[in-house]
Amino acid sequence: MERLMQSIRIGINDKIYVKDPESSDLGKRIIEQSILMIDEMGFESFTFKKLGVCIKSNESSIYRYFENKHKLLLYLASWYWGWVEYKMVFATTGMTDKNEKLKRAIEILTQTVKEDVSFSHINEVLLNKIVINEYSKSYLTKEVDQENKEGYFVIYKRLVNRLHEMIKAVNESYPYPSSLASTVLEGSLHQYFLKEHFPMLTDCNDNITPTEYFTDLVFRALNPKTYG
Amino acid sequence: MERLMQSIRIGINDKIYVKDPESSDLGKRIIEQSILMIDEMGFESFTFKKLGVCIKSNESSIYRYFENKHKLLLYLASWYWGWVEYKMVFATTGMTDKNEKLKRAIEILTQTVKEDVSFSHINEVLLNKIVINEYSKSYLTKEVDQENKEGYFVIYKRLVNRLHEMIKAVNESYPYPSSLASTVLEGSLHQYFLKEHFPMLTDCNDNITPTEYFTDLVFRALNPKTYG
DNA sequence: CAAATATAATAGTAATACTATCAATATCTA
DNA sequence: TAGATATTGATAGTATTACTATTATATTTG
């Protein structure tokens, strides 16, 4: 798996960047260090100026890769969801038992990333933390409709849709497959956040994972007669 | 109900503001107009300078009420959740049927606000929209633990807890009552957002409400043997 | 009416989020 | 290998943001 992952490229909408950061050494340093810095100081405090100092490059050079830090966040998020999508498809294709398949998918989608599987310069553990803390900010904007039209969220939408399809496969009469799918993806990030900062608002802790909670929830919803 | 609401005061942690905006005419105009402006231009573009122009007052005068716009958002959110809590408690106290009580609570917590019930200067319809679009930003910060310690989120936490208690009352053996409660509250805002901007990711539309989806979900989760 | 308080007006600072220009390198191509 | 081209770096500059400080002017209250 690790070997395989190293040669995978995540296809990201090329309108998100001015110049593909994968195409140069500077570009890769921008991605690598921005992940470390955003995790460290939070997206609000992060600036291209600070990043420039950190990678010993110039602010103006970074602007040649990304219009602004918002676009950089969109890039990081797209990369993350593309990576999760890859892992999910890889883990579930070929599975014939629909229940098991859905269960496995939920597992992949709701688990934390524990070790850096190492796409060379991208630290997936920190990127996962960034997505938990910052992803909402990438779409809770006044420009969301325009940016959605331009395709900045396609990967995420495709991922929700894949889950939606698996839910339908298990119970085609369940009336809210899309909402359930989006609830699992978004809710999972939220439960991780609560676990860290508002432990009173969640049952998730060192023993109970968001994966257990959502697996249970989804199968109760889909199969009320036989579950539990 | 309307009459009653007009005389209610929402008790907000006084560390959120420098000077209580309810204590003066200027303070009320700050609240009133900031709601209109944040709804109109989004929280990112909103500044105290612009607000000053809008209410024909001075930037520096606004700083005497709120340290910064983040604190103002915390204030608006606290007010909103306090108002929702009031409505929920009002609607459910005295109900004896635990199932009906939970159902009614979910209804209140997940419905949109359709008309301005008019706390004089506060437009609840717009405030509800602001909460959908901006609430996450109030806690997805590096300062969240400190601010939580100072009690800036007590009302919201109390509300989640009330729902948690009602869930337990219906099914005390359900293993994830806190997570389910927080999922309903946060997920409801998310479904409204998706309905508006990513309709493919939700089943909610003009005919299906987040209330129906979450009522169904919660009762399927709590009562798998008899529901549906 | 005097004192206290609230608000307004003005000015100023450091940082942010860029844009523009030009020089220095590196690389690729004829 | 010279010459063109692309990439990066350095410097400067602008408008806006997010404040703080000071002083003046209303307004309230005792």
Image (spheres, coloured by chain):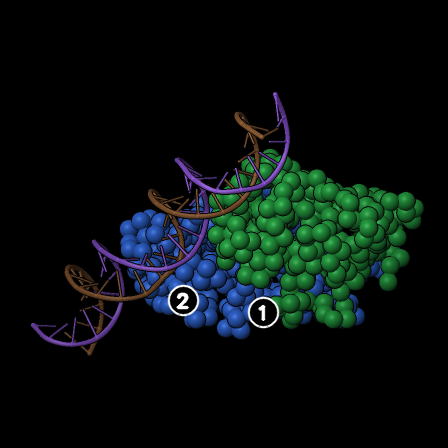
Chain colours: A green, B blue, C purple, D brown
Q: Chain of mark 1?
A: B
| B211 sits to left or right of B14 | right
Comparing B57 with A25, the one in front is A25
Q: Position of residue A18 (x, y in %)?
A: 56, 38
Type of amino acid under label 2: Tyr
Q: Quadrant of residue A123?
A: bottom right
Q: Quadrant of residue B204?
A: top right
Labels 1, 2: one chain: yes
Residue at 39 percent of width and 64 percent of height: B67
Q: Residue at x 68, y 46 (%)?
A: A79
- The residue under label 1 is which amino acid type? Arg
Q: Can the viewer see residue B58?
A: yes
On the image, the x and y values in percent for residue D17 come to: 40, 52
**In this image, A138 relative to B45: left or right?**
right
Is the residue B153 above or below the residue B204 in the image? below
Q: Which mark is residue B17?
A: 2
Secondary element at tag 1: helix
Which residue is identified by label 1? B158
Q: Position of residue B207 (x, y in %)?
A: 66, 41
Q: Which residue appears farthest toward the right when viewing the image?
A: A96
N-terminal label among 1 and 2: 2
SS of the residue at dot 2? loop
Which residue is painted at 74% across and 54% down in the image? A118
In the image, is residue A207 above or below residue A210? below
Q: From the image, state whether disc 1 or disc 2 is nearer to you.
A: 2
On the image, which quarter does residue A113 sit in? bottom right
**Other-residue count near label 2 (Cα within 10 Å), few / some / many at <14 / 14–19 / ≥20:** some
